[in-house]
Amino acid sequence: MLHQVVTRPNYDKTSSVDEHPIRMEPALPSEIEIKLDLSNEALESLLDSDLLGDPDEALQQSSTYFETGDRRLSQKGFSLRIRSTGASHIQTVKTSGPAKSLFVRSEWETPIEGNEPVLDHTSPLISEFGLELEVEAAFTVFIERRVWNIELNGSRLEVVVDRGDVVKAASGPIREIHFLD
């Protein structure tokens, strides 16, 4: 399934100049993502057009975002969410990108059982915040996600249109389109 890929650090093997044993250095995974907020009219116009055609997938998803009571995760540039699609649950930790709409950031995705965060060695949160890190649900987003996979001139672009609502925080509609490379 799209967005359900387990992303873990890759390791580059390098040997030291004096031929000591190989040492491992993590090369962090990253993604490049552009997000655009759309008005309801713009979204309907896009979906009614022939520009994208029929989606390759249509999914019902919920994503619960977690935070500490004092907002330390976001203050240090991290986000933690659990996305559920059917019986599948993926925990994702992301670092902040440099701009509001263009995201180039590190990401750690791990399949988990259930809707409670797993705070262990599979993400950078424990090394950054310590074993006593406690998080709680901040808000949940319920969306219908439509996915198109576009291949052109040897390049692959994933276009994702989300429509849904935010619950528990400042509630409001969501209408976004994503372009992923």
Image (cartoon, helix red, strand yellow):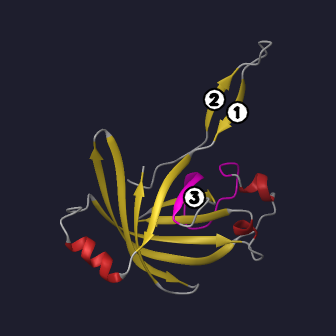
State which tag comes first along the sequence, 2 or 1. Answer: 2
State which tag comes first along the sequence, 1 or 3. Answer: 1
Q: Residues within 10 Å of mark 1 (few under 14, many from 20)?
A: few
At x 63%, y 33%, the residue is: 11
At x 51%, y 48%, the residue is: 6
Q: Is residue 10 above or below residue 50?
A: above
C-alpha gap between disc 1 and disc 3: 22 Å
Image check: 133 left or right of 82? right
In the structure shown, which secondary structural element does the residue marked by tag 3 occupy?
Answer: strand
Residue at mark 2: 12
Give the number of the disc on residue 25: 1
Residue at mark 3: 92
Image check: 73 left or right of 89? right
Q: Is residue 159 magenta?
A: no
C-alpha gap between disc 2 and disc 1: 6 Å
Question: Magenta region: which residues?
Answer: 101-123
Looking at the picture, which amino acid does disc 3 mark? Thr
Q: Residues within 10 Å of mark 3 (few under 14, many from 20)?
A: many
